[in-house]
Amino acid sequence: MSAAVPRRAGVIGGGRMGAGIAQSFATAGAAVTVVEQDETAAAKVRDRVAGSLERAAKRGLLPAAPDEILGRLTFVGDVSGLPADADVVVEAVPENAGLKAQLLAAAERVVGADTVLATNTSSLSVTELSASLARPHRFLGMHFFNPVPASALVELVVPEATERAVVDLALDWTAGLGKKDVVVKDSPGFASSRLGVALGLEAIRMVEEGVAEPQAIDDAMSLGYKHPMGPLRLTDLVGLDVRLAIAEYLHSTLGERFAPPALLREKVARGELGRSTGQGFYSWND
Ligand SMILES: NC(=O)c1ccc[n+]([C@@H]2O[C@H](COP(=O)([O-])OP(=O)(O)OC[C@H]3O[C@@H](n4cnc5c(N)ncnc54)[C@H](O)[C@@H]3O)[C@@H](O)[C@H]2O)c1
C-alpha cells in the first residue's frame, strides 16, 4: 500500500466530524471544499478548524503554518458548489438516511465519473445509502473517529458493489492522512460499533444486576485489559442516547444479543445522557 493525498477533496457537512475530516485532508496538503448550510455555519467550521490547528501547531504536529493550512479550505452553501474534479467527497451530515442519500445523489450529479464518494455514517447501511446513486461502484464508507485529527483509525466499509480500485484509493488516502485502516464488509455496526456497543451493553447489564459499581467495571477493563477507558465512561462520553439509538438498530438487524438494557432506556428517559447533561453512569458536574 502507498500513501497518497487527494489533490482536491470535498466534505459535505462541517460539524464535529466534517470539520475534523476537512482539517485532516487540508493538513495533508489537499484543497478542500466544505459544504455547509449557510455562512454562519461555515464561519463556525472555520473557527473550529482554526482553533484545532492552533492547538496542533503549539504541540509541533503541523507540517505547515496554521494559516497556510486554513487557506486550503473553501466554503460553499450547497453541493452544487463541489468541484467537478474532486478526487473524493466525504459526506458527514447528521445520521439521517434520507438526508444522506439525497445529498450523496445530488453530489454525484456534480462531480466527475472518477470521483470517489464516501459516507462517514457510524451505523447506517452503506449499501442502502447507495440505492439512489448512479455509480454505486464508486462509493464506500470512510468511517472516521472523533476527534478526527488525533484519531489513528479509519474504518473502510465496503459494500458488494464497490470496485476494488476504489478500496485501493481509500487505503492510499488513509495512509496519506497518517492513519491506519481496517477494511470491513458492509454489515450492521461494522466492526467498531458492533464490538464497542456489545461491550457497553454488557457493562450496563452488570450495573443493572448489581455485579459491581461502574468505576469497578471500568477499572477491570482499563487496568486489566489495557483499554484506554472503561466501557461505561466511554458510554458517558459518546452519549447514552446515541448508544441507545445504535443498540436499537443493531437489535433490529442482529437480534436479541443487542437488546438495550432497561437501565439504559430509563437513564435516557430521565435525561441522564452522560457528560453532555452532567449525569450518566458518572456525575460530570465538577
Ligand atoms: N460524533 C461522533 O463521534 C461520530 C463518530 C463517527 C461518525 N460519526 C458520524 O458522522 C456524521 C456527522 O456527525 P457529527 O457528530 O459531525 O454531526 P454534527 O451535527 O456535529 O454535524 C453535522 C453538520 O452537518 C451540517 N448539515 C446538515 N444538513 C446539511 C446540508 N443539507 N448541507 C450541508 N451541511 C449540512 C450541519 O450544519 C452540521 O454542521 C454522522 O453520520 C455521525 O453518525 C459521528
Image (cartoon, helix red, strand yellow):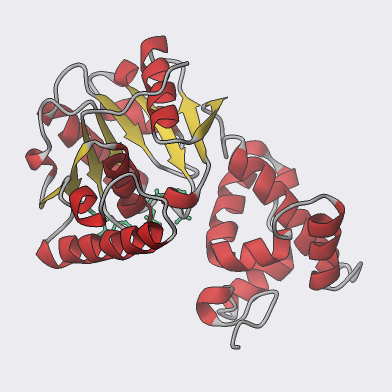
221 or 120, which is in the foreground? Answer: 221
Which percent across, then down, holds residue 221? Answer: 81, 56
230 or 210, which is in the foreground? Answer: 230
Which percent across, then down, holds residue 161? Answer: 40, 15
Asked whether the viewer can see residue 92, the reply is no
Position of 160 with respect to 189 (left or right) is: left
- Who's the residue at 30% across and 40% down the image? 25
Residue 110, picture quadrant: top left
- Who's the residue at 55% across and 62% down the image? 238
Position of 146 with respect to 273 (left or right) is: left
Which percent across, then down, holds residue 124? Answer: 46, 41
Q: Is residue 35 above or below residue 185?
A: below
Asked whether the viewer can see residue 139, the reply is yes
Ligand 1 quadrant?
bottom left
Which percent across, then down, holds residue 71? Answer: 15, 50
Q: Is residue 140 above or below residue 65?
A: above
Question: Where does the C terminus fall, quadrant-wise?
Answer: bottom right
